[in-house]
Structures are given as C-alpha cells and as structure tokens.
Image (spheres, helix red, strand yellow):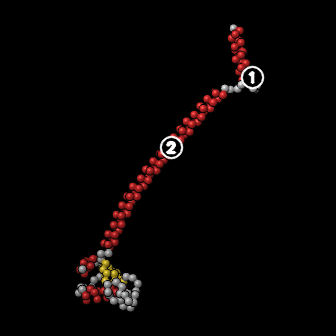
Amino acid sequence: RLCCLLDIAVICLRKLLLLGGDIKTNPGPDTALILKQLREIAADIKDIKENRLVEIKKKKVDALSNLKEKVTSCQERLTHMNQVVLTLERKIDDLENHSRRPNLAIFGLPEPEGENSGSLETAVNKGIFQDLLELEPVAIERSHRLGRPSPNKKRPVILRLLNTRDTTLIF
C-alpha cells in the first residue's frame, strides 16, 4: 500500500511540476507530440481547403451549365425570330406588289408648264387612252409624276386606276 501511495504521490508531483513555471524541473510538453498535432491540424486544414475548392468548382460548373442552357435557348429563339422576320418580309413584299397592281407607269408624256393633277389626268385620258389606245376614258384614282422637275427630262407619270379591270383592258 505504501508503494501505491508513493506512486500516486510521484505522479501528482510530476503533474504539479508540469503545471508549475520552473523550467529546470519542468521540461514542458513533448516536441514529438506537438509536431504530430501540428501535422494533424495541417492535414485537417488541407482537407477543408480541398473540400471548399471542390464545392466552389461544382458551383461554377453548375453556373456555366445554366448559362449554356440560357444561351442555347436564346439562340433557338433568335433563329425562330429570324424565320418569322423573313416570312413577314416576304408577306410585306407580296402585299406591296399586290397593292401596286392597279398602278400604271407612263413614260415620255410631255410635261407642260404649270401642270396639276387635274390637267395630268385629262392629258392621260385624252392623249394616251383615247387617242393612242382607242379606249373609253377610265376613272383615275390618283396620278403624279416621279422625281423633281427638270427642264431637259420628261418625268414618268404614275397613276392608279379606280377599277383593276381597266388595268387588264389596257394590257
């Protein structure tokens, strides 16, 4: 029993010495143990960094994937819109051509001084339709000359007939 008590006393004394500030009697903690703990801490920090980098990389890949999907969707919509624009351009062109069907262009008709739309319609009806083509006078919806007046040049006349059938009779 005395031996056990002595062992316990020695253990207590050693622990008290470790807690005490006397450097000669207290050698301090074991260096190998400290190095082992530092290595473990460094390994833990490395694992944490690697896990964090993996998470960041995954988030970036997901974000890029989402952006790629959005770009693909926008490209598909753009392609569709381009097709719609082409279709609408064709329809507009067709409608413009269709609206010009009743129009006639007359070239070489003399342009008297002070000409107005009424005198132009009379000149077209008399000089072109009656005298030249030997047709009855036709109803003209509107008429005008193209371009700016020039003393050396006869401007063409554009006229729109009221009745489309009159246009087919002329041709």
86 lies above or below 56: below
- Under tag 1, what secondary structure? loop
- Relative image position of residue 137 (x, y in whole percent): 27, 85
Q: Is residue 97 left or right of residue 59?
A: left
Q: Which mark is residue 37?
A: none
Q: Examine the rendering and report whether any part of residue 18 can be seen.
A: yes
Q: Position of residue 54 (x, y in %)?
A: 51, 40
Q: Nearer the viewer, residue 86 or 8?
A: 8
The three-letter code of the residue at mark 1 reads Thr
- 88 versus 72 height, above or below: below
- Foreground mark, 2 or 1, reads 1
| Residue 122 showing in the rendered view | no
Q: Residues within 10 Å of mark 1 (few under 14, many from 20)?
A: few
Q: Is residue 154 above or below residue 11?
A: below
Q: Quadrant of residue 76?
A: bottom left
**Label 2 vs 1, first from the N-terminus:** 1
Q: Residue at x 70, y 17 (%)?
A: 11
Q: Residue at x 25, y 89 (%)?
A: 131
Residue 128 appears in which quarter of the rendering? bottom left
- Image vertical order of residue 45 relative to residue 94, above or below: above
Residue that appears at 34% across and 83% down: 157
The residue carrying mark 2 is 57
Q: Amino acid at mark 2?
A: Lys
Q: Quadrant of the N terminus?
A: top right
Which image quadrant: the C terminus?
bottom left
Q: Secondary structure at mark 2?
A: helix
* Residue 67 image position (x, y, % from top left): 46, 50
- Residue under pointer 1: 25
The structure residue drawn at horizontal position 36% and vertical position 61%, both measured from the top left corner, is 83
Q: Position of residue 151 (x, y in %)?
A: 39, 90
Given residues 158 and 65, the one toward you in this image is: 65
